[in-house]
Amino acid sequence: MLNKNLQKPAYSLIYALVITTIIMIVATTAVQTTLGKLTYYNDVLSGVYAKYSAESAIDNALLAIKDAEAGYETSDTSSATSQYTVVSRAQHNVVGAVTSTEFYTPIPMTGTAAPSDECNYLAADDEDVDHACNWNKILYGDSVTIPLYSYDPLSSDTNHLSNPDELNLTEWNLKVRTPCSDGTYEDGCDRYELDEGSTYEEDGSIILWQLIGEDIDVNTVVSEVPSDDATPSRGSYIRTTTTNTEIYESLINDAQDYSSATKYNVLTTASPSTSDPDDTDLLEICNDSSIEKLYLQLSIVNPLIIYGSTTDESVPYLEWQLESSATSAFADNKAVVIGEGYYIGQSGTFYYPSVVTRTTVGERTATYTISN
């Protein structure tokens, strides 16, 4: 006869199995959650390490170019975790029909006329030449300096500089426009109109420009400044269009309505030269082999008043772009530094790109910008 004290209900075994199963599920879930959190933490940490590597690459690049001439370009890909590239010359814009001799300053997608989060140099094929990311801004009282030469490691010059004639320059066009009045950055927007007035005195010169370089034959600085030629007319004056090279309010307004080939052009190499009777236009000055380190300098010298404003409300700034045609490109007025960081983590290789800009000619509007 069986001992009744040893008999246990069958369902107690089932309870034990259920409880054991629950404990195993909870334990497995806890382990998986912990492992997931650890993986996530390691991935975040790997991304941070990749970011540090990119920043380290940028520091190395800035050190490498601290004394470099405008247009100096270099790279270092020797490290598997930290690499950099420095771009410092005008470039093609890959949108639309582009010839091999057509270059743009600023370097496409690095302009200051749009916020930095709108412009991504690493995706420079996304915007056309008239998007604000391809233009720089200039404010009232501000000035910019644009190199019309470039560092060239193959140049026979002692300082390895190539002047416009050595770059086989055929033309450049300075383009100036007002920004979009609706706060957007695409071409085709409604733009501010400057209050140009109806007389010579009211239609004032807005941008004072200057070509300045070093004449190595006579060891002196030479420059070309705007001609303000005007002829009397009914108690006032009108600009002599064949010789006047000022950049004035109505010129900027009108240039916004020019045909596509000349749209926004306010000064070109075909503009007449008045400083030297031997030079007929600005192209001859640029291609003078005795002039080195030639710059185009721009300064806004008068307020930018909105057309029709009764309270002298101002246009916030102007936008500029230099289009050039040559065998080789001018230097930009800044260097674009691309740092790339890599880190091998548990989930694979982590990559972090970072882009900063550094002025090469002391332009006040150039500041560091970060993108990733």
Image (cartoon, grey):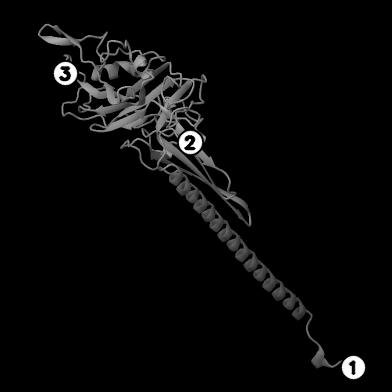
| Residue pointed to by mark 2 | 73
Binning the other alpha carbons within 10 Å of mark 2 as few (below 14), some (14 to 19) or many (20 upward) gives: many
Residue 116 falls in which quadrant of the image?
Answer: top left
- Residue 341 in percent (x, y) is at 54, 49
Residue 272 falls in which quadrant of the image?
Answer: top left
Left or right of 185, for residue 143 = left
Pick the residue in front: 174 or 195: 174
Question: Label 2's element?
Answer: loop
Left or right of 244, for residue 189 = right
| Residue pointed to by mark 1 | 1
Left or right of 172, for residue 9 = right
Residue 308 falls in which quadrant of the image?
Answer: top left
Residue located 32% across and 35% down the image: 363
Pick the residue in front: 131 or 248: 248
Separation of residues labelled 3 and 2 (CA atoms) = 45 Å
| Residue pointed to by mark 3 | 202
Q: Earlier in the sequence, mark 1 or mark 2?
A: 1
